[in-house]
Amino acid sequence: DYSIDNAEVVAAMQGKVKEPDIRSTIQSLANFTNRYYTTQTGLQGAQWIKDKWQTLAGSRNDVTVEFYNHSWRQPSVIMTIQGKTKPNEIVVLGGHQDSIAGFSTGEGTRAPGADDDASGIATLTSVIKAAMEAGYKPDRTVSFMAYAAEEVGLRGSQAIAQSYRSQGKNVVGVLQLDMTNYKGSSGDIYIMQDYTNAGQNDFLADLVSTYQPTVTLGYSECGYGCSDHASWTNQGYAASFPFESTFNGSNPHIHTAQDTLDKSGGNADHAVNFGKLAAAYVAELAKGNF
Ligand SMILES: N[C@H](Cc1ccc(I)cc1)C(=O)NO
Ligand SMILES: [Zn+2]
Ligand SMILES: [Zn+2]
């Protein structure tokens, strides 16, 4: 039940996904000493994202940006664009804001998390910017989520997904962006096939072949619930996880003080592919126009 027939909106939004924007957001987030779920700087990072998304939302009265508070210090951040004609049907795009550098991470521990997962948050932010600049108004509700506490057991997304399920919310699809900027394999985008929805994965492949014909697509597996998409899958929702490389090609610097932008060439060229895919995913699943 996926259709691809909103080319004008896809083109407008994809054209506004810019590498310098993504690079700048990665750098800003990586500059926090760490974004660990219990530290002061982890809370400051959440505040930074909320302020950034609120600024992009401007005065749009169909847009909210809120903290989703948890039992620990770092809140998740949720930006919601109210759907015009089918507001009860929800499209979710997420990534995690927290970072980690080993099990002893605490106040003062250096964990830049440029790829894991500032890249995903920056990619989401570029799609938000594109949607706001284009004056995009979706038919379905669209929620962008910066999950807290992914590194310590997918805890932020688990809390949110469980809450959505218990409220009977109709989430029609979830896209996870975790590590989008390290080109560790020959291909551009790798669709994870475990803990995801096969039908939506096919939809993503169709979006790439339709709107990003020069982007090469591969498939891989994590072997376990390796990011927040698993929280949504566990609650019976359709989730997909496009990833930067094959498992073997993934960024070896993650979870260390060396997960910095320079390891990806000092640019966000690889992440742009994911920003354009996410833009197409929003425009074709949430439909709507300007
Ligand atoms: N385990 C994930 C990283 C990760 C995700 C997918 C693959 I394939 C390889 C590595 C993580 O640390 N997420 O925060
Ligand atoms: Zn990680
Ligand atoms: Zn991650």
Image (cartoon, grey):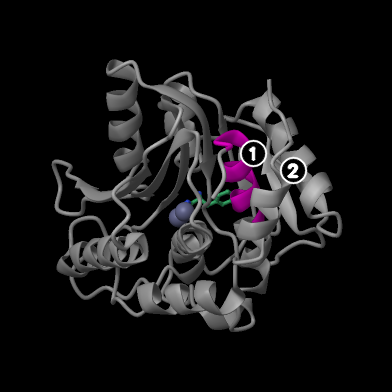
* Image quarter for ligand 2: bottom left
Is 30 contained in the magenta span? no
Q: Amino acid at mark 2?
A: Leu
Q: Which residue is tagged 2? A: 207
> Which of the 4 image quarters holds residue 6?
top right
Q: What secondary structure is the stretch in magenta mostly built from?
A: helix
Residue 19's place in the image compared with 197, above or below, is below
Instruction: Confirm or deny contact between disc 2 and disc 1 (CB under 8 A).
Output: yes
Crowding near the residue tagged with mark 1, few <14, some 14–19, many ≥20 C-alpha atoms within 10 Å = many
Task: Name the disc covering residue 284, or none.
Answer: 1
Q: Position of residue 87 (x, y in %)?
A: 40, 28
What distance separates the C-alpha of mark 2 from that of mark 1? 9 Å
- At mark 2, the secondary structure is helix
Residue at image position (33%, 15%) is 168
Front: mark 2 or 1: 1
Left or right of 41: which side holds 141?
A: right
Q: Position of residue 76 (x, y in %)?
A: 27, 49
Magenta region, residue range: 276-287
Left or right of 159: which side holds 287?
A: right
Residue 239's place in the image compared with 213, above or below, is above
Q: Nearer the viewer, residue 88 or 201?
A: 88
Residue at image position (47%, 65%) is 122
Visible in this render: residue 131? yes
Residue 182's place in the image compared with 6, above or below, is below
Question: Could you tell which of marks 2 and 1 lies nearer the N-terminus?
Answer: 2
Q: Position of residue 187 (x, y in %)?
A: 80, 58
Q: Quadrant of the N terminus?
A: top right
| Mark 1 close to ligand 1, CB under 8 Å | no
- At mark 1, the secondary structure is helix
Residue at image position (68%, 61%) is 273
